[in-house]
Amino acid sequence: MLLVAWRIRQRRAWAIVAIAGTILYLALRGLPQALVVEPASGQQWNWSGHLLALAGMLALAAMLWRRLGVSPREIGFARPSDVGVAVRVCAAALLLSYPVHVVTRGDVEEISAATWLFVATMPGLAEEVAFRGVLLAAAERAAPSARTIAGVPVSVGAVLLTATFVGLHGFGPGTLVSVLPGALLYLWLRLRTGSLIAPIIAHNLWNLTVLAAHL
């Protein structure tokens, strides 16, 4: 992203904001786990890390709004539009994804209630506020050139940020089957509705669909 925005000073500054924001998000999310010397036995979910990352992104959003003139609407803090279309597209995507996840699922241990609760809340909330909210607003200012794809204007910044989001989940068949299609859906919903509400809900439902496929 920095290379794309390098020639124009203002865009270069926004690219640095997007990169620094991504590093901040990852650092805050991983901080609680880094401070644990001996991990507890059993399956543990990083609630505190996700809450810290969410708080950090909200603080960054406030700074962008007050200091740099980024409106809450640019970040996705707005009432969604085209809700009917968003619901239909999301429902169709979830229905199509479920059999794919069933076919590609691996062996997992018994799914606990804590797992269901975490998957239904934290990943979608923290990641969407970051990657389809605060960081997207910065990335689009860094690389605003856009083309209309599937009825929404997709900027170069949005593409680069989505690629970063997918890459942070690792590389492999599971990423191509689950993470990439999900990321494209969340981005489309954010751009189509102008709000974070739809991608947050879709993200958590997508994760629950992946979990349900292992039953």
Image: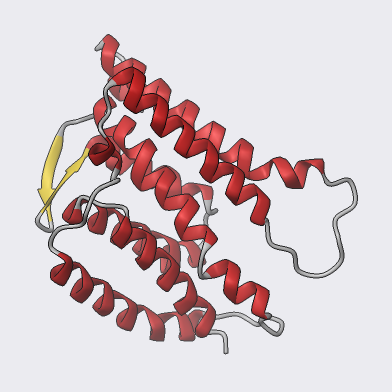
Identified at 19% across, 30% down, the residue is: 144
Kindly give the residue lying farthest to the right in the view shown. Answer: 38
The foreground one among 72 and 116 is: 72
Measuring from the top left, give residue 11's x and y in whole percent. Answer: 27, 18
The foreground one among 15 and 78 is: 78
Residue 124 placement, left or right of 132 = right
Residue 153 placement, left or right of 25 = left
The vertical placement of 1 against 101, above or below, is above
Measuring from the top left, give residue 57's x and y in whole percent. Answer: 47, 38
Measuring from the top left, give residue 69's x and y in whole percent. Answer: 27, 22
Identified at 51% across, 65% down, the residue is: 121
Residue 97 placement, left or right of 7 = right
The quadrant where residue 71 appears: top left
The quadrant where residue 79 appears: bottom left
Scheme of image coloration: secondary structure
Residue 133 placement, left or right of 168 = left
Specify the quadrant that holds the C terminus: bottom right
The vertical placement of 36 against 41, above or below, is above
Number of numbered callouts drawn: 0
Measuring from the top left, give residue 165's x and y in whole percent. Answer: 44, 47
Identified at 45% across, 30% down, the residue is: 60
Specify the quadrant that holds the N terminus: top left
Kindly give the residue lying farthest to the bottom in the view shown. Answer: 215
Identified at 25% across, 27% down, the residue is: 141
